[in-house]
């Protein structure tokens, strides 16, 4: 146990586990498979605790944010910053793809390998997905737009049992708003119950974190053992661009967090090590929630109320990683089919990638690949054939995608929570030691905030108009 505790707290130790796991995937596949099985057990425990923790954390987060000065303005700024980061991911992916040109000048061998993958999956795409991932094949066969029942579920317990994070979050927000509007005398007993559940879930996750080294080892072995070298070589230009873009945007987010927290960059990276590792290896956007709340509030000193509200929200809606992925994938497919992109088509890719990222909220794994069709259909590119290529790589790309979205949510917290503790202290003093809840909903904006909101709305409207012109011109 001491060895696992030491390794789980050491960045170098985790890197060594990943390297040794990759070697096991080549030379000792049974050992890697056993470690991967144990790692999946760890993820099952974390996911079991993450969903109820999402619900409880959102309750407490809403209550604490509403108790802060100017809560409506604060929530409005959270939404604007979150949307801006999704747009930034889309624009960055498109521009990096246009400049780097992934998919251009592929060798005959690489094109033959990609063609073989498409032909192999033409008869039964579901069989290929089951062989690769052992789950989610039916979801990958086609993605549909989010329905009303997915956003506003008619049965809260059903979405909890199914693990649909979008429906869980919206139902939790509605219940949490009503919960936060009540006085503390009316909700004292329920708050005590929630507090006990919260601490119990945190204890479960803290104990489970001892298996982080086993998770890193097993996932590395599984990736190496189940990914064809020829496929990696054929798609290497996309993988390199996506990896470098994710690292660059993730580094920018870490620098922003470090500046706002007033701590050194490496210390911030060390504090966020556990949630980043879980995000990279779990394939789940909700699994890192407990680790992220603990790291941002207890170790980096951000307002716990803002953290408990934004982290669950970010796991569902702040999909900067998905926007980057969709934009870069669309440019790759266009280059693969020798389709040059003009200025209007670049704008279409940017806008469609943002739409696809937001529409796919609550989706994860292979199911999210299907939403790439929204972007590709706007460019009249083959959706089915291109989708098969990215399904084979989704297990590799899902980790960086989730990690970038996680860091984007942390960046939202860093940008909107400056000065909140002192503001709350002043508010408590002004009300005689009790932070009163204002039940009247008013949105108040300064001129600068109003100008920012107007600019964002104009940008979105312009993108929609350009998107319509581009589609109509074809």
Image (cartoon, rainbow, N blue to C red):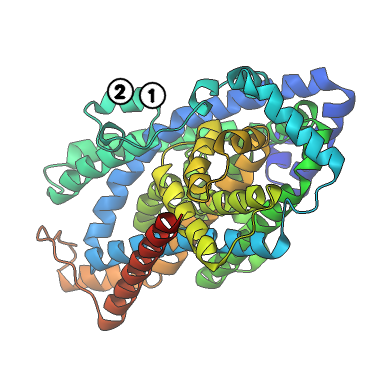
The single residue placed furthest to the bottom in the displayed view is: 447
Q: In the rendered structure, find residue 162 and report the number of the disc placed on it.
A: 1
User: The N terminus lies in which quarter of the figure?
Assistant: top right
Alpha-carbon distance for marks 2 and 1? 6 Å
Residue 87 tag number: none
Drawn side of residue 181 relative to residue 237, left or right: left
Residue lying furthest front: 474
In which quadrant of the rendered view does residue 83 lie?
bottom left
Q: Nearer the viewer, residue 382 or 284?
A: 382
**Residue 371, how many percent across, how many down?**
48, 40
Q: Which residue is mark 2?
A: 158
The reply to whether the C-beta atoms of the residues labelled 2 and 1 are less than 8 Å apart is: yes
Residue at disc 2, secondary structure: helix
The reply to whether residue 269 is visible in this rendering is yes
Residue plotted at (71% across, 59% down): 101
Count of residue discs: 2
Between 390 and 287, the residue placed more toward the observer is 390
Residue 300: give x, y in percent of width and height: 52, 60
Depth check: give the residue in front, 115 or 250. Answer: 115
Residue 359, relative to residue 430: is it above or below?
above
158 above or below 294? Answer: above
Closer to the camera, 78 or 385?
385
- Residue 27 in percent (x, y) is at 90, 25
Give the residue drawn at x 35%, y 33%. 197
SS assignment at label 1: helix
Which residue shows up at 19% across the image and 65% down it? 433
Tell me what residue is drawn at x 36 percent, y 38 percent: 166
Residue 267 in view, yes or no:
no
């Amino acid at each position: 146990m001491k060895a696992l505790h030491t390794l789980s707290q050491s960045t170098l130790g985790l890197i060594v586990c990943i390297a040794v796991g990759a070697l096991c995937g080549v030379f000792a596949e049974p050992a890697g498979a056993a470690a991967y099985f144990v790692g999946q057990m760890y993820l099952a425990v974390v996911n079991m605790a993450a969903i109820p923790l999402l619900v409880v954390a959102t309750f407490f987060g809403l209550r604490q944010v509403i108790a802060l000065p100017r809560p409506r303005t604060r929530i409005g700024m959270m939404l604007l910053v979150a949307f801006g980061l999704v747009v930034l991911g889309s624009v960055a992916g498109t521009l990096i793809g246009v400049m780097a040109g992934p998919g251009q000048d592929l060798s005959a061998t690489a094109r033959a390998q990609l063609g073989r993958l498409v032909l192999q999956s033409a008869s039964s795409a579901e069989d290929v997905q089951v062989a690769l991932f052992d789950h989610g094949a039916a979801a990958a066969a086609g993605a549909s737009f989010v329905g009303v029942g997915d956003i506003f579920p008619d049965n809260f317990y059903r979405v909890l049992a199914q693990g649909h994070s979008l429906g869980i979050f919206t139902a939790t927000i509605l219940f949490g708003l009503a919960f936060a509007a009540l006085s503390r005398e009316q909700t004292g007993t329920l708050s005590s119950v929630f507090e006990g559940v919260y601490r119990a879930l945190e204890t479960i996750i803290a104990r489970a974190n001892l298996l982080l080294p086993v998770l890193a080892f097993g996932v590395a072995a599984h990736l190496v053992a189940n990914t064809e070298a020829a496929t990696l070589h054929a798609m290497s230009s996309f993988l390199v661009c996506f990896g470098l873009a994710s690292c660059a945007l993730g580094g920018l987010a870490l620098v922003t967090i470090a500046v706002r927290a007033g701590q050194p960059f490496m210390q911030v990276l060390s504090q966020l090590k556990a949630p980043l590792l879980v995000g990279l290896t779990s394939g789940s956007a909700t699994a890192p929630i407990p680790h992220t709340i603990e790291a941002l509030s207890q170790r980096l000193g951000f307002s716990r109320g803002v953290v408990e509200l934004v982290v669950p929200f970010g796991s569902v809606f702040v999909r900067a990683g998905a926007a980057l992925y969709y934009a870069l994938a669309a440019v790759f497919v266009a280059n693969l089919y020798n389709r040059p992109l003009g200025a209007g088509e670049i704008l279409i890719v940017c806008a469609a990638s943002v739409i696809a990222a937001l529409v796919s909220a609550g989706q994860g794994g292979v199911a999210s690949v299907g939403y790439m069709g929204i972007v590709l259909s706007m460019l009249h590119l083959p959706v089915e054939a291109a989708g098969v290529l990215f399904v084979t790589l989704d297990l590799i790309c899902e980790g960086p995608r989730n990690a970038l979205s996680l860091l984007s949510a942390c960046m939202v917290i860093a940008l909107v929570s400056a000065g909140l503790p002192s503001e709350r202290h002043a508010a408590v003093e002004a009300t005689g030691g009790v932070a009163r809840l204002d039940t009247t909903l008013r949105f108040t904006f300064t001129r600068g905030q109003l100008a920012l909101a107007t600019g964002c709305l104009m940008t979105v409207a312009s993108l929609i108009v350009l998107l319509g012109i581009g589609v109509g011109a074809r």
